[in-house]
Image (cartoon, rainbow, N blue to C red):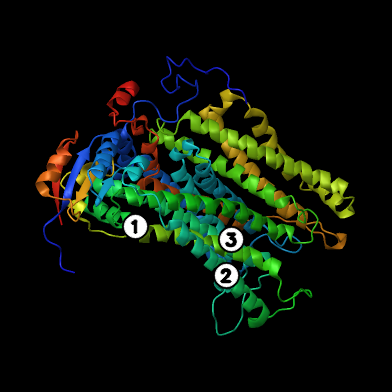
Amino acid sequence: MPPREGIYGLIAEFNTPAELVHATQQARRAGYRRMECYTPYPVEEAAEALDFHRTRVPLVCLLGGLMGLTTAYLMETWINVWGYPLNIAGRPLFSWPAFIIPAYEWTILFAGLSAGFGMIGLNGLPQLYHPVFNAPNFRNGATSDKFFLCLEAADPKFSIGETRAFLEQFPAISVVEVDH
Amino acid sequence: MATKGPLHDPVVDPMIDPRTGEYAVIAPGHNFKSVTQKIAGIVLTSNTPLGWFFGLMVGAGIATGVVIGCTWLFLKGVGIWGVTIPGAWGFAIINFVWWIGIGHAGTLISAILLLFKQTWRNSINRFAEAMTIFAVVCAGTFPLIHVGRPWLAYWLFPYPNTMNVWPQFRSPLAWDVFAVSTYATISIVFWYIGMIPDFGTLRDRATLPFAKWSYGILSLGWRGSTRHWIRYETASLLLAGLSTPLVLSVHTVISFDFAVAALAGWHTTIFPPYFVAGAVYSGFAMVLTLAIPLRKFYHLEDLVTLRHLDNMAKVMIGTGGIVAYGYGMEVFMSWYSASHWEFFMMWNRMFGPMGWAYWILILTNIAIPLTTLWSRKLRVNVVYLFILSLIVNTGMWFERFVIVVTSLYRDYLPSSWGTYRATKWDYMIYVGTMGLFTCLFLLFVRLLPMIPMSEIRMMLPQTKITPGGATAEIIDQETA
């Protein structure tokens, strides 16, 4: 895909999470929808301000767990009943209680891997290039002590002049353009 | 337990929270920047402390024991060990259970304490998780090399093969393979996912090109987006929820290795809870063994405070109490079951030729820790805690020794009695794994963030958001 040209959005830098959350709430109230907060630790209030509540990670995790349970149980049954039947002290070939333990472990294994990799996948990671890294101040603080709000150009309400004026009414340290 | 008055004057000792009289979880005066600088600085500095090189050298020297011991073992077979009939399970299984037990505190701290919203875990969970993984590495070595023909150990895995030979799922040893490999995998995933945001921080702060590049790859392009954070937190909670039954099941399955056998001293239903509690007990002892020197050498007293040590010591009272109950119940059942064999086993365990091991175990695991840890003064005495953690680790090793050896060497038929004596190769491989553990841990401390920065930031007072968007500068001033 050829690199997209032009501006990705406007990014405002704040010193405190409270200022960020306030600005985000105001931006949403003003009608902006395509925006994102960048914080050095999870700020739940920011997610609320963005109206982002539900994730599909638990569903992926549940499906993974069910898949692990079925896979392991069917595998054990096939192996010990048909694939390689062994008579151990006259025990039944279908020794279902003994099969529970590996099936339980694989339920956890598959569910855990689904939760972990599902989260990475749903987040669109790994993504080693992203426009916000182009903002000159972003990497100085986004992962340590600064709070960023990015209003994206893809938003229909976005206009470089008005949006900049909107962001500058907050006590932001800086408002800069982010290139694609 | 009722909280008594503060040990020191809160006005004099800044580490004491004046509101509660307890030790603070984070020293006052820290902010986002200082925390980040402190933790990232340990990794990103170009001045590696000389002590680190010294430690690595000593660790590597000891770890050669594993290499030499295993080489000789592969050449000659398990006959070089002390295992024989009737003592067919010796150091290999003792060390395996001991090491895997040590790992359990890491998962407990990262999973169960997360679910219970115990924020004090945040300073210690990363290196406790690292401890788990390296302990599992050491543990996993033993089952691999004890099978007699270790190059065929992979037969335990269900994989399609031309011989049409498959594992036997009625055997606890096959369960072990599933439990331990799942445990190792999930621990690594949980550990890595927890580090992704910190890798982002390290990538942004690194100056050397190679460090920038490698932390950049490891961070997967993490940028701290709020939507990412929410999914990340959900995934962390799910992983914690999954690891909690996992950590309980792993040691339960390991206890089944014993409990499923029809042998006096092994065939008991107390084993699963008693093994799990013992695992957590020794695991917390190991976290203390690691945390106390770490906070001293890297000056982390601000972040790993006396509060953490105190709380860990309290967990040890709890789990140690369960272990003591387990010992009591074993003795009680050997009498109450009215089984001649059980009774003889217990008598022999206490007063037989290996009775000394039982009494060492009682002394180091129960008598010393459970009498002294009730004292708050001793719980916050760093030197005492360090010595005690070593004592408990020794005690837990003896517990496994007593369970394995004293049940096996004198079973039902006196004509088949024997004894068990470990050889120098047993000791060499066992001590060698400690060197291996030391090396892995030192590399971790040098290359990866040993305290989760993003989680520490969440605990700072500056995170408070007051309605109306008041800035946190006021709070900043309060804490300054």
Q: Are marks 3 and 1 on the same chain?
A: no
Residue B92, quarter of picture: bottom right
Q: Which residue reaches farthest bottom?
A: B162
Label number found at residue B363:
none
Q: Is residue B399 visible?
A: yes
Residue contact at pointers 2 and 3, CB within 8 angstroms: no
**Looking at the image, which residue is at 11% across and 61% down?**
A5
Front-lying residue, B5 or B133: B5
Residue bearing mark 2: A70
Q: Nearer the viewer, residue A67 or B355?
A: A67
Neighbours of disc 3 within 10 Å: few (<14), some (14-19), many (20+) = many
Provide the secondary structure element on which disc 2 rests: helix
Q: In the rendering, which numbered label is found on residue B179?
A: 3
User: Residue B77 in the image: x percent, y percent?
Assistant: 61, 69
Horizontal and vertical percent for residue B411? 82, 58
The answer to whether marks 1 and 2 mark residues whose Cβ atoms lie closer than 8 Å is no
Q: Amino acid at mark 1?
A: Asn
Q: Quadrant of the N terminus of chain B?
A: top right
Residue A110 visible to an observer of this rendering: no
Taking A119 as reference, is B128 left or right?
A: right
User: Which circle, 3 or 1, is nearer the viewer?
Assistant: 1
Q: Secondary structure at mark 3?
A: helix
Q: Residue at x 62, y 62 (%)?
A: B176
In three-dimensional space, the C-alpha distance between marks 1 and 2, rounded to whole angstroms, equals 28 Å
Tell me the residue that label 1 is attached to: A123
B12 displayed left or right of B462: right
Which amino acid, by three-letter code, is at mark 3? Ala
Identified at 27% across, 46% down, the residue is A37
First-in-chain label (1 vs 2): 2
Q: Nearer the viewer, residue A119 or B394?
A: A119
Task: Please report, as a chain letter, where disc 2 is located.
Answer: A
